[in-house]
Amino acid sequence: DDLPALTRRSIPELRATAGGGRIPPPLVDRPKCPRCSLVTICLPDEVHSLHAPDIPPRPLAVPWHEALPLYVQQFNAKLAKKGDMLEVSKDDKVLATARIAEVSQVVLMGNIYVTTPCLQALMERQIPITWHSYGGWFHGHSLGHGHKNVELRTAQYRASFDEARCLRIARGLVAAKIANSRTLLRRNWKPEEKPERTLLDLKKMIEQARRCESLESLLGVEGQAAAIYFANFRELIRRSDDANFAFDFTTRNRRPPTDPVNAMLSLAYSVLARSLTVTLQAVGFDPFRGFYHQPRYGRPALALDLMEPFRPLLADSCVIQAINNGEVHPSDFVSVAGSVNLHPDGRKRFIAGFERRLDQEVTHPLFGYRLSYRRLLELQCRLFGRHLLGELPEYPNFTTR
């Protein structure tokens, strides 16, 4: 009798909470949290740990996602729904199948035909479809109704018009990007003589970024750090006397990339931007309203903001691994009208390497538990939401040592 009575008394409280317009604060050290399916959304231990650093969070969430992206890049292929499966075919020949329940998003590269029943099934399940050019340029994505978290978007829009808050957020993002770039150089340096001067210069620029008093000056510091970083990027690439395996890099260029290394960097940044755009949408953000990158029609500014610290850790690192491990070769690239792009077979291997990188586990420096980079992107997006909603005084950027 006690349980039905308790349930009846709780119903008005639940209704009042749901209609109150404010998300209740996360619970602290409650035994019910480990069994709750929403623990990765409300992050009770993580939020409490950032307020009380002496109390480490419990590793309540699984460190990886069971569902994974489905990539389709076969020219003129068809994507259709067959029962509870997705089927990729061309000229009535089945090329691949995947269970819908095991697909987190569908990534289409080039001219791919998607049937209406397939679109409807994916939208009903809130599985996004992202559309890319044949060369990998991110055009946009299709989704069902989208997230209903109006409170988070309201907080996002309100904060994005606060210049002081935009600058504070941007300073942290750029400082974290420079710090992670410095770490990548230190870890992957090939010559015997260590780049002590370069590392010292980047360390100074981290502090400069934290002290910038305007977005314009911050852009200048970021540009100087990027120039130093990419001037030394070639020293991270393994040398080869065999022309079939040799890559060269002199400077960063894009739109279009004019050499194989820049082509891979551009593709990696595009795939990373797509990943964060989808994650931000799933969390409840508007990915097109940012704080550092200025709003422009069709540009996912918030995704570009939050991906800054992850450019070296995910995109640049993936390019270095693909070259140094022999996963791609100079023969995998084609040059048309001054633009260099990966051949489909090479792009398939490169994207597979990028997805493997997302599945690699890393120890979170603030929380102490291990999780995949794929889960880390979601965790950081949710922590950013907690900051905008006032639960965290600052956004804790991710940096690695």
Image (cartoon, rainbow, N blue to C red):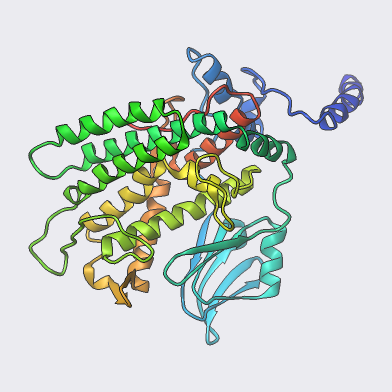
The C terminus appears in which quarter of the rendering? top left
The N terminus appears in which quarter of the rendering? top right
Q: Report the front residue among 334 and 56.
A: 334
- Residue at point 40%, 40% (across, down): 219
* Image coordinates for residue 308, horizontal then vertical, percent: 43, 42
* Image coordinates for residue 6, horizontal then vertical, percent: 88, 21
Q: Is residue 203 left or right of residue 141?
A: left
Is residue 311 among the parts visible in the rendering?
Answer: yes
Q: Report the front residue among 118 and 1.
A: 118
Residue found farthest to the bottom: 91
* Image coordinates for residue 358, horizontal then vertical, percent: 42, 48
Total residue callouts: 0
* Image coordinates for residue 48, horizontal then vertical, percent: 58, 19
Q: Quadrant of residue 227?
A: top left
> Quick check: 215 above or below 260?
above
- Residue at point 34%, 72% (across, down): 345
> Quick check: 246 above or below 41?
below
Q: Is residue 354 left or right of residue 241?
A: right
Q: Is residue 81 left or right of residue 145?
A: left
> Quick check: 68 above or below 219?
below
- Residue at point 22%, 37% (across, down): 186
Is residue 352 among the parts visible in the rendering?
Answer: no
- Residue at point 42%, 47% (across, down): 359
